[in-house]
Amino acid sequence: MAAKSSDAKKASLPARIVRAVTSVYFDLIDAESANVQRSRRRLDILGRLIPPAGGVEVSRTALAGLSAEWLIPSGATAGKVLLYLHGGAFVLGSAHSHRHMVSYLARAGNIAALMPEYRLAPEHPFPAAIDDAVRVFDALIADGYASSDILFGGDSAGGGLAVATMLKLKRQDKPMPGAAFLLSPWLDLSASGETMQSREAHDPWFNAADIPIVARYYCREDEVTDPLVSPVYADVSGLPPVHIQVGNDEILLSDATRLADKLRDAGGEVDIEVFEEMWHVFQAFLLVVPESREAIDRLGAAIRRVNRP
């Protein structure tokens, strides 16, 4: 399926305000000297301040040796699960930081979501996070879930990790999940995409020059084109249906569009939505930005189509 844009119209006032405020914050971050531990704590604290969606039960668990969190909407379809891999450039993020957005996504999709806290770089570089995600998938299978009843989700680095996990499952001749839902996936740590240049002046958060710096936290320089690090270099034949959302103003736009093209060329099923004047993982601001709520509602509808009992 060809890429499609949301209705081309000027961004809402709340979107423009959030964009401006967050842009100032990101301008203050020095990718080379940022304190990873402090950044993790700040992100988690912020996440704890925002409540989950109403009607969604939150519970901690352990699976495959990892801490994890279940987010289960009232009346969720039985026997189905959204295995959601949080973003954070492979170095940040947790169930706390992403609980808010994922709880709304779970409710919109009427599906129980599981967020594992996979190992983070730089303490645990590539391929630790992929190994963890595969172990969680295997554990769900061992618990009685059919592979087709497990859906993958992820934003940013988590979106890239979702694709890499499917590629690893393919290498191991294991069954695939039923589908994958990706929000602004980071799929090219080599920063070779065309929009690294064409969108840099428009992206309110990221600079192209910072991408290689951040990538070094996760992998060695000679690993950036490994297909499990940067899935834009992978053979994506045999992957399940993939639904992608991405902002038109982010430098990672071509990560998403190149994956969509590769999936299509390989005969796969792919649906990509490009949201005008939106930025990286804009869906996280769904409490205040109408475009974010619309995007979550669309993702929820797409999940429900796959998630029929």
Image (spheres, rainbow, N blue to C red):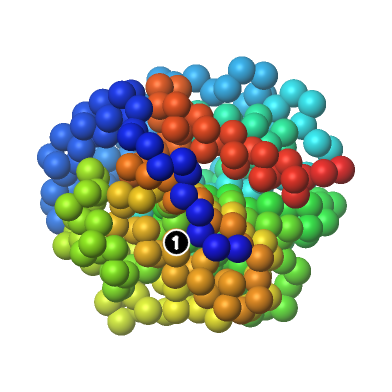
User: Residue most toward the front?
Assistant: 8
Instruction: Work out whether 117 lies above or below 300.
Output: below
Q: Say left or right for 254 vs 266.
A: left
> The C terminus appears in which quarter of the rendering?
top right
Instruction: Work out whether 102 lies above or below 260.
Output: above
According to the image, label 1 marks what residue? 256
> Residue 309 or 84: which is nearer the viewer?
309
Which residue does the image show at 75% across and 45% down from the upper left?
Answer: 305
Q: Amino acid at mark 1?
A: Ala
Which residue does the image show at 50% across and 29% down from the upper left?
Answer: 293
Mark 1 packing: few (<14 Cα in 10 Å), some, or many (20+)?
many
Which residue does the image show at 29% across and 57% down from the upper left?
Answer: 251
Instruction: Work out whether 48 lies above or below 62.
Output: above
In this rendering, does residue 134 appear at all?
A: no
Instruction: Work out whether 43 lies above or below 307.
Output: above
**The quarter of the displayed image where residue 70 is located:** top right
Give the image location of residue 264, x and y in percent: 59, 72
Local secondary structure at mark 1: helix
> The N terminus appears in which quarter of the rendering?
bottom right
Q: Say left or right for 278 vs 53.
A: left
Q: Say left or right for 86 vs 71.
A: left
> Residue 160 or 14: which is nearer the viewer?
14
> Residue 273 or 48: which is nearer the viewer?
273
Give the image location of residue 306, x and y in percent: 75, 49
Give the image location of residue 90, x and y in percent: 39, 55
Which residue does the image show at 44% across and 56% down from the upper left?
Answer: 185
In this rendering, does residue 144 appear at all?
A: yes
Give the image location of residue 94, x and y in percent: 46, 41
